[in-house]
Amino acid sequence: MTTRTATRLDPRYWQVLALSCLVLYSLFWFHFSTSLIQVALTLGTALATQYACTRIWRLPAFDPKSALISGLGLCFLLRTNLPLLAAATAVIAIASKFLLRWKGKHVWNPTNFALVAMLALSDRVWVSPGQWGSVAFFCFLVALLGGLVVNRSARSDVTYAFLASWAAVLLGRALWLGQPMAIPLHQLQNGTLLIFAFHMISDPKTTPDTRAGRILFAALVALGAGFVQFVLYRTNGLLWSYAVLSVTVPLIDRILPGVRFAWSRPVTGSPSQGVAHEPSRVALPAPPPAAAGRLGAAGR
């Protein structure tokens, strides 16, 4: 595969396009309180932090795609009246990609980590889970664009496993309490839920390497979110559950080992895919130690 073809197929281009459309739609259709200045500040800070970290870690090239995805996610979800806090959240998100790693893999989704950190540190930021309400067209748009992204990145399994698990939690609770089915069905018609499922928990760099591991992880996050929301009676149960249970991913990868994800070659993580590519890796000459260090960090 040529470099040009690999670049054209990079799923992050699709995700940047999808998130940009959704942010613009939210700004001009829903008239969210987030200003264009705050959007520009958040994206500019994310890109500047990515550039600074690229120089500090001596990566071979500046890659803005992941920083744009994290910044657009913050534009979607973060609400604050202080632009400085929006910029600080963007710095935390991007810096966490470089600082919080386990065996070369991200531990937390950058956007989710930054949101949870700021919610814990400050009472001047918040997330509004119901800000999109249950507008049918918006939900359809999120699902359509999100479905394109997760299929391109070979991570649709974790998205659909999470939606099925969360639906089971809501329907099971309604049956347990004797509630009418209209209540859980209304709770499922939520724009924030779809954004979380299609653009956050599906992050290939933080989910388990195998399909079985990802399905297990999605079910654990759904159960954890139900515990936070219905037992602890706290808001943002999806974000808190995802952040806490992300520390289990290294253990899941150890129990269910698979092929590590790479943006240049999205795979589902099946061990057979790794075996198929093993001979070509053995045939290549070993890079010098300094170059190997830079290549190992190129996926940040």
Image (cartoon, rainbow, N blue to C red):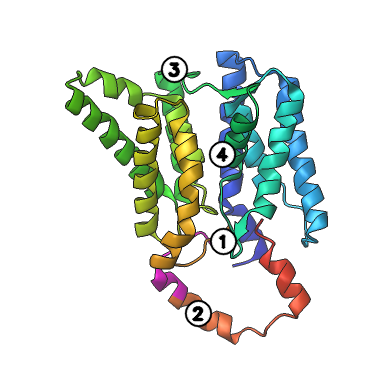
Q: Which mark is residue 133?
A: 3
- For mark 2, does the 10 Å Cα neighbourhood hold few (<14), some (14 to 19), or many (20 or more) residues? few
Horizontal and vertical percent for residue 126?
58, 23
- Residue at figure coordinates x 51%, y 83% from the top left: 279
Q: Is residue 168 above or below residue 97?
A: above
Q: Which mark is residue 280?
A: none
Cβ–Cβ below 8 Å for labels 4 and 2?
A: no
Estimate the spatial distance between the alpha carbons at disc 4 and disc 1, rounded to whole Å. Answer: 21 Å
Q: Earlier in the sequence, mark 3 or mark 2?
A: 3
Which region is colored magenta? 265-274
Horizontal and vertical percent for residue 268?
43, 60
Q: Earlier in the sequence, mark 2 or mark 1?
A: 1
Which residue was labeled with disc 2? Answer: 278
Estimate the spatial distance between the alpha carbons at disc 3 and disc 4, rounded to whole Å. Answer: 21 Å
Type of amino acid at the residue the image marks with label 1:
Ala
- Residue at figure coordinates x 56%, y 61% from the top left: 262
